[in-house]
Amino acid sequence: MKPPSGTLKCNVRSSWSNDQQMSGAAWILRNHNGDALLHSRRSYSLAFSHTLADLHSLHWAVESMVNLKQTRIIFEFSLPSLRDALANPSSHPESQWLFDAVHVLPQKLDSWCLRVAPSSENKAALEIATSVTRDLRLHSYVARNGPS
């Protein structure tokens, strides 16, 4: 779904490898026409769970939007473990600092919301995140437009 005019949508995904104890994170920023404006990827080492990978992805996406001076954002994610963790953060005491950070950062935005989307609507962000764990593309970047 396209965001309303004047609002941007940030699709967020993660990929996690238990064997390598690492995760990949990706986001794609789209305008009200559905056009990709920016996209980005990064890796995390010592990712001990899928939930931790998902939390890192969301935190990093929110932090990126704040740093890029974006102010009206819909964060859309397809991360089942994140949805469950956000509903019950006390079940993940090892990640409390990330829950706190995820709640503090959006206060720097004018308007924001979190939305759960079907995985089929987040395929591009998933492919970018998976490039970290599958292909070991460990360098981070921010690029204009969508992925090629």
Image: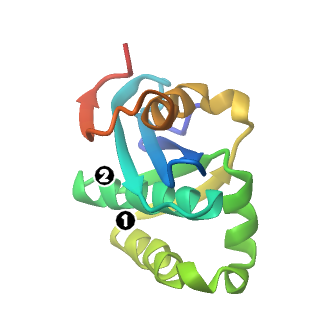
Q: Secondary structure at mark 1?
A: loop
Label 1 near label 2: C-beta < 8 Å? Answer: yes
Residue at left offset 56%, top offset 33%:
126
Q: Amino acid at mark 2?
A: Gln
In this rendering, the answer to whether 92 lies above or below 78 is below
Cα distance between the residues tagged 2 and 1: 7 Å
Q: Is residue 111 visible?
A: yes
Is 124 on the left or on the right of 106, as rendered?
A: right
* Residue 22 to residue 9: above or below: below
| Residue that label 2 marks | 70
Residue under the image location 67 percent in, 50 percent down: 79
Q: Residue furthest top?
A: 148
Neighbour tally class for label 2: few under 14, some 14-19, many 20 plus, Cα within 10 Å: some
- The dot on residue 87 is none
Q: Quadrant of the C terminus?
A: top left
**x and y percentages locating residue 83 in the rendered image:** 71, 61
Q: Out of 19 and 93, give the one closest to the viewer.
A: 19
Count of numbered badges drawn on the protein: 2
Disc 1 designates what residue?
A: 109
Task: Name the one closer to the observer, 109 or 16.
Answer: 16
Amino acid bearing label 1: Leu
Residue in the image at 57% along x and 46% along y: 17
